[in-house]
Image: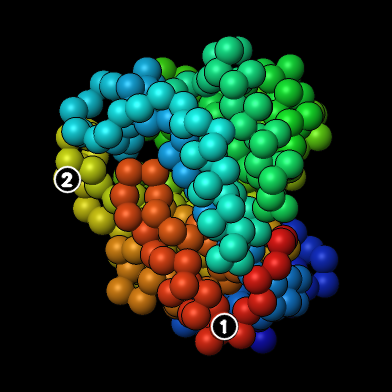
């Protein structure tokens, strides 16, 4: 029995893949790796597929210097800028997404963190969504404190999103206005307040496969079960605008390796999926079992109807994971 099958079977029997084993997977035959990853996904998660949508709840003028981001005030990207959206506006979008069959809806805001007054304002909006819809409320509002997370929890937020983005080693090459430890602290604060956490990264920032594996290992050690995999969409005006794009084979290998490391997680195809010729179909046959549908923050995405049609064709069932 070859290495892929041996490791797959040991994971199905409860073993955790090591960093060394994951790195070996980075050089095995891709088709065999993807097939084995899909078997692991089927064993731990069945046909369940977690689909969510997001809204850009506050846009632009971010003080952070993340080198990929169109919303950073450090770069000239000509995006639309606006303050916090009203509760009625968020309710309208949440209600529409719920009607379309979406189970989770996330409000994402620009900036390193919302101020205390903005937290109070957005918590009123979250309360409105909780009262008027049954959709699960997710949030991505920056590097918040434990006390702020308690307010979000009380307002009806169930899951918090805060990407690690890349490995600890490579993080300073991506951002210098906050640290990897700031990210980890935020995740731990959210969990301590009783929130689930969604955390992953962006692929194609210039990182290595070792960086990607290291990040996945940190995500596993933190106990995160929802893991977004974004593909860098180089934005004109950012420092990474001319970086070579990730190939689809590279992406499929990342997805499959992540399934070996995170066998029971919702591995979520996120930003950049609309750039793929098949809109992610091959990724959903290589270990991925979740997605962000609709538009992203500053780029267009894939329609909910198109996604639901594809998932039905692939035999998935939309469920919360």
Q: Are marks 1 and 2 in contact (CB under 8 Å)?
A: no
In the rendered image, the vertical position of residue 101 relative to residue 201, given as above or below: below
- In which quarter of the view is residue 160 placed? top right
Left or right, residue 91 beside residue 39: left
Residue 185 placed where, x, y %?
Answer: 65, 24
Query: In the rendered image, which quarter contains the N terminus?
Result: bottom right
Q: Which mark is residue 312?
A: 1
Front label number (1 vs 2): 1
* Secondary structure of the residue carrying numbered label 1: helix
Identify the mark nearer the N-term, 1 or 2.
2
| Number of residues whose C-alpha sits closer than 10 Å to that of mark 1, classed few (under 14), some (14–19) or many (20 or more) | few
Which residue is nearer to you in this view: 320 or 131?
Answer: 131
In the rendered image, the vertical position of residue 120 relative to residue 161, given as above or below: above
In the rendered image, the vertical position of residue 63 relative to residue 110, given as above or below: above
Residue 235 placed where, x, y %?
Answer: 23, 43
Which residue is nearer to you in this view: 99 or 228?
Answer: 99
Where does label 2 land, which residue? 242
Which residue is nearer to you in this view: 49 or 205?
Answer: 49
């Amino acid at each position: 029995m070859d290495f892929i099958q041996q490791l797959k079977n040991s994971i199905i029997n409860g073993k955790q893949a090591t960093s060394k084993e994951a790195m070996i997977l980075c050089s095995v035959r891709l088709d065999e790796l993807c097939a084995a990853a899909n078997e692991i996904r089927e064993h731990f998660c069945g046909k369940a597929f977690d689909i969510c949508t997001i809204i850009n709840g506050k846009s632009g003028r971010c003080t952070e210097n993340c080198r990929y981001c169109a919303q950073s005030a450090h770069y000239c990207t000509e995006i639309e800028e606006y303050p916090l959206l009203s509760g009625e506006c968020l309710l309208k979008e949440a209600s529409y997404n719920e009607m379309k069959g979406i189970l989770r809806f996330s409000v994402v805001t620009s900036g390193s963190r919302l101020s205390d007054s903005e937290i109070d304002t957005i918590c009123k909006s979250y309360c409105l969504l909780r009262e008027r819809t049954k959709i699960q409320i997710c949030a991505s509002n920056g590097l918040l404190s434990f006390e702020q997370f308690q307010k979000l929890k009380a307002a009806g937020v169930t899951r918090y999103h805060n990407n690690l983005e890349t490995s600890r080693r490579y993080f300073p090459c991506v951002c210098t206005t906050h640290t990897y430890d700031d990210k980890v602290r935020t995740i731990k604060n959210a969990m301590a307040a009783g929130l689930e956490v969604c955390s992953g990264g962006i692929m194609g920032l210039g990182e290595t496969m070792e960086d990607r594996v290291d990040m996945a290992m940190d995500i596993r050690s933190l106990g995160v079960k929802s893991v977004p995999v974004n593909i860098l969409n180089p934005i004109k005006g950012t420092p990474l605008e001319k970086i070579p794009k990730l190939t689809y084979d590279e992406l499929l290998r990342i997805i499959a390796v992540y399934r070996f490391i995170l066998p029971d997680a919702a591995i979520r195809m996120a930003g950049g999926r609309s750039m793929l010729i098949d809109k992610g179909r091959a990724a959903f046959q290589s270990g991925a079992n979740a997605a962000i549908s609709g538009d992203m923050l500053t780029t267009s995405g894939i329609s909910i109807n198109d996604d639901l049609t594809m998932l039905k064709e692939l035999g998935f069932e939309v469920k919360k994971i």
